[in-house]
Amino acid sequence: MKQRRETPADAHLWERLRLVEERVRRAVAARRAVDPDPDDPYRGRYLTPDGADRLLGAPGGLGLPALAPDAAPEGSVLGELADRFGLTPLETDLLLVVAAPDLDPRFEPLYGYLNDDLTRRRPTVGLALELCGLPTTSPARFRLAPDAPLVAGGLLRVTDPERPPLARVLAVPDRVTAHLLGNTAPDARLAGVLGTAHPDPTAAPQEARRAAAATAGGSRHVHLRSRGGDAEGLAAAALDAAGLGCLALDAGALAERPGEAAEQARVAALEARLTGAGVVLGPLEELPGEPAARTRLLRACCAALRGVPFFTYGYAVWAPEWSADTPLTLPVAAPGPERQAERWRRALEDAGDGASTADAPELARAVAAHRLDARQLLRAAGAATRAAVLDGRPVSAGDLRVAVRAQNGAGLARLARRVEPGVGWDDLVLPPPTHRRLRELALRARHREQVLGAWGMRPGGGRGRGVIALFAGESGTGKTMSAEVVAADLGMDLYVVDLSTVVDKYIGETEKNLERIFTEASAVNAVLLFDEADAIFGKRSEVKGAHDRHANIESAYLLQRMESFDGIAVLTTNLRANLDEAFTRRLDVVADFPMPDTGQRLALWERCLRSLPRADDLDLAFCADRFELAGGSIRACAVTAAYLAAEAEAPLTMRQVVTAVAQEYRKLGRLVLEGEFGPYTADVGQV
């Protein structure tokens, strides 16, 4: 028989298989000794009367002594498998007997001969017991019951359920055979759902050991609830601290095939036991959103993975109906500035840009407002490094911001309009108090993890770690542009919520739409903008009918949801008085946007027209002094005047500017008065 002798541990398997071969040899000899015609070519296909008499007169069994167990050498694949699955020596022997045809093809025809059925070339329950020296009446037959370690652990399959128990055929899954032969490739049935979990290199050792110790008893299931921290990285670090491998299941891939989740979880449990690993499943937010579907999937996974070190993670609190046993829940706090800088330093080193690691603290500050798990951080570091290498320079903060924004999923883009910021602080013309409020919003977003997390300044009542701001002012005073500037300063995208996709005439649907938006926004590094927010954040009123009652329920839901929000949101309104006072109390920053004064209007005119060629008669001071327009209207006038200049193929003139202003006045419903237009009144009279 062909053998492998790379190491004593490898040789042990073949030595044990040689014992099985010897027992089969003796069993064949015993059968031939009582066979009246051993050369009958049709043996195994029919039963003669004499053969029936011999069967009825036989005492049963082969009368062979049991296999003598031997001590497995250290590192033996068979010994490790027995330890991980809790197999007794008898169960190990049964496994070897069943696996023999997969390890050596000569066993197939021999088993067919012993079964007296040449078409059944695998061992039956009865034959497996006989080859282990046991009578079929032995209680050991229950070692092959569905709840026994061999079958429940997935090492053996009992097929042909329609046959009597002793005639049922036993088989070993291909993955178990491959493992016995030293193959470490994961089970092919996990293709598509098996991900990669990277241990958080900055996780505190005591934190990783505590999470590992939590899997030691009971169902061995631990739920890591992320509060901005890298829960997946902590789970992988905990398994590493326990000396275990990590098998990561992608929750999103499982959600795509919920009907196969139970089987894939059983395969994952077998793979974890074979390789000495734990299982990590998450994030739970990617599982089916429908409660019943999510419950079915999680209950199936928890049942299949019971007894295996098992971590789930996500922002959600574990619901009791998701599993038969309630897991131990551990919170995962967001990393502080120093730890975040260390994470970026290591990620950039792994990406191959060692020259940039000295600047890791500065680069980390550039994306301090972002929440990234280990996979996102490594992908962002790799993308930023490739962009820098392409230009032949070190990684910059801009590279990192672009790479971090690319980690956002498309979920929120289906619910809101994505705006990639293209403006900065220098593009704003605002009074100093408003400017300070915007800077305060940016610094709150950047340092919220340190203040609310590390320093414990988060108030009670279930308040999240989000930052909520209100921008109040007339139309065109720069509210939306300011939100874009803040997003640009944080290195984030701006998502503008389209109220037409939120408000629904059916009761309860508006709240569901908002919940989807808040949930997606919490998982995305972005600034969420509710334009014209008073449409959905209005005051509660006295209940005079069903409509008022449901409107108040909607407002009450928003109050609760905003408090638990973990993202960054900006509400804008033209009518601040229309907002409910309860919303105002929950705001972190309130910025008022007044109409610009003369000096600010002049600055706005200059900035809007700075790239255009100008005629000598252009008098922007006159425009700033006479025309009381908001910034948005000034920009509209500048664009209209630019079109007029392009048509004339000449530098921009004063007449073109005042013509554009007159058009804007009429659009706003204002009169063109000589007191405002002065000497240019006649030029615009026919506009």
Image (cartoon, grey):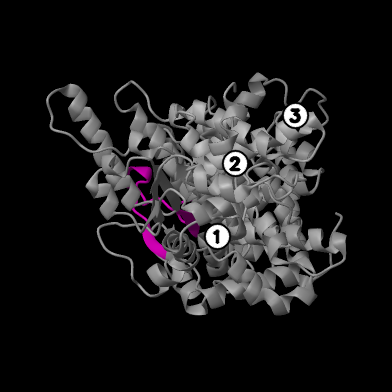
State whether residue 329 is above or below residue 46.
below
Residue at point 50%, 31% (across, down): 665
SS under mark 2: helix
500 with respect to 414 (left or right): left
State whether residue 667 is above or below residue 464.
above
State whether residue 105 is above or below residue 87.
above
Give the mark toward the camera: 1 or 3.
1
Give the mark toward the camera: 1 or 2.
2
Residue 588 appears at what percent x and percent y?
35, 59
122 with respect to 472 (left or right): right
Residue 242 appears at what percent x and percent y?
54, 71
Between 651 and 349, the residue placed more toward the observer is 651
50 with respect to 6 (left or right): left
Determine crowd level at label 2: few under 14, some 14-19, many 20+ residues with C-alpha closer than 10 A: some
Q: Choose the circle earlier in sequence order: 1 or 3.
A: 3
Highlighted magenta segment, given as a residue range: 304-331
Determine crowd level at label 3: few under 14, some 14-19, many 20+ residues with C-alpha closer than 10 A: some
Q: Choose the circle earlier in sequence order: 1 or 2.
A: 1
Viewport quadrant of the N terminus: bottom right
Name the residue carrying label 1: 370
Between 629 and 571, the residue placed more toward the observer is 629
Q: Is residue 37 magenta?
A: no
Name the residue type under label 2.
Arg
State whether residue 121 is above or below residue 223.
above
User: What numbered label is drawn on residue 118?
Assistant: 3
Name the residue carrying label 2: 635
Q: Quadrant of residue 452?
A: bottom left
SS under mark 1: loop
Asked whether disc 2 touches disc 3, contact meaning CB atoms under 8 Å apart, the reply is no
Q: Choose the circle earlier in sequence order: 2 or 3.
A: 3
Residue at point 47%, 55% (across, down): 313
Residue 640 appears at what percent x and percent y?
65, 33
